[in-house]
Image: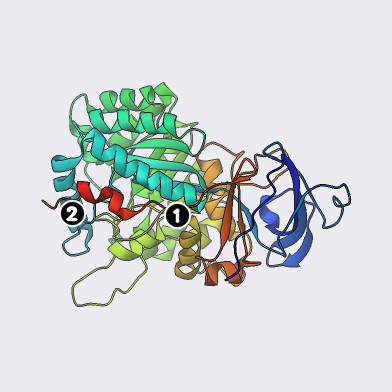
Amino acid sequence: MAEAISPPEQERYLLVNATLPGALTAGGLDHVGDGLGRADILIENGGIAAVSPCGVLRGQGLPESELDGGLVLPGFIDMHTHLDKGHIWPRKPNPDGTFDGALAAVATDRAAHWSAEDLRRRMEFALRCAHAHGTVMIRTHIDSVSPQDEITWPVFRELRRDWADRIELQGAALYGVDLLNTPGFLPRIADRVAEAGGVLGAVTYMIDGLEGHLDSLFQAAAERGLDLDFHVDETGDPGARSLRLIAEAALRNRFEGRIVCGHCCSLARQDADEVDRTLDLVARAGLGVVSLPMCNMYLMDRKAGRTPRWRGVTLLHEMKARGIPVAVASDNTRDPFYAYGDLDMVELFSQATRILHLDHPVGDWIDVVTQAPAWMLGDASQGRLDPGGRADLVVFRARNWNELVARPSGPRTVLRGGRAIERALPDYRELDDLMERL
């Protein structure tokens, strides 16, 4: 098998005959179809100094790395993960693969095992995987049910500090919206999130008083200058319509921060009129939506002895057509909500292309793991290949979308600041001493 490239060690060099997505760079490409173009890239002092048509930058005596048409992408953005749950599968698997089974298994494991040491080691293991695969930015949801929040949020803050030069790490509070019925809960968790520089949110479902709880969340976030990130309608029940209620609350409260809604599975089970009404409101309210295709295919419509009838994903094509920002993300990794995964965004993009039909034409769908999630997470400098940006790149032997999606495990080189990193993945055996079963 052909090997990944080894770029020059110099501070100034050329990547020649690269293939780039036109949607992620400002220009300088010789277009070759499928939204792709050829270019040479000048790397200088850890940044992208220029992107130019092939040959224009050559002849200056610069060291060169010949890509032979190899695809170059920006570092990936994984905007919806659960690092605190990750890698507990060996000690607490899901007994039946269902959503309810996952909830119960995680609750048991959290109460029994989630010490600061346990969390730090599992979360750092996950970050090492993501870094090796080429991810530069992650938002993780953090279980924030007392007393766990007093352990996990401090660990998160330590890891964010320790990993600041490799992965930009964000944290979002996670708890069931019914906890807002508990006096004092919302101001306490909102203050904790604000202190940690995190994102407020909740898991929403159709309960009495949901509209009032949403108003309280929007007001608490606005008072503290926080963005919002919700888990929304993760069910096949067409009666689950909290996505529409969130959009209405955003408009009603004139909320100025960023709002992300994850999952939104039930939307795909609703009739066309309801979908149109909801998506019109989502577009007006400026919400962004992230689908979790691998995890939701695992969980949704699972019944023993019966083949699943639907894919568990939301309506990304219809949303994108309305100008709604959309993304896909990893979600859970080797825990009761999803038994598999490695925080590899190439695997995710490959699977999402199949599951969500992000092809024929493939067009600019690479946006869903690059600049769209970067914008939703508030850092539009990430996820693009423009001059002036940092040379945090992923370079493939694959020359086009077909080769990348057909062989997502093919050779790749991860550059950080223009330098190749060591891509050795951590061994699962490193966690063996944490995996004693209950």
Left/right placement of residue 9 relative to residue 402 reads right
SS at mark 1?
Answer: helix
Left/right placement of residue 196 relative to residue 279 reads left
Q: Which mark is residue 92?
A: 2
In percent of width and height, residue 278 lies at 43, 53
Q: Write down the quadrant of residue 355 in the picture.
A: bottom left
Left/right placement of residue 157 relative to residue 276 reads left
Task: Name which of mark 2 and mark 1 comes first in the sequence.
Answer: 2
Q: Write down the quadrant of residue 160 in the picture.
A: top left
Q: Evaluate whether residue 174 shows in this view.
A: no
Q: Which mark is residue 277?
A: 1
In percent of width and height, residue 269 lies at 35, 65
Instruction: Name the residue type under label 1.
Output: Arg
Q: With respect to residue 408, does 150 lie above or below?
A: above
In percent of width and height, residue 172 lies at 37, 37
Instruction: Name the residue type under label 2.
Output: Lys
Residue at point 65%, 60% (across, down): 71
Q: Which mark is residue 225?
A: none
Q: CA distance from mark 2 to mark 1?
A: 41 Å
Residue at point 17%, 58% (across, down): 101
Q: Nearer the viewer, residue 22 or 13?
A: 13
Residue at point 32%, 22% (across, down): 191
Quadrant of the rendering where the N terminus is positioned: bottom right
The answer to whether mark 2 and mark 1 are in CB contact below 8 A is: no
Residue at point 19%, 59% (across, down): 94
Of labels 2 and 1, the one closer to you = 2
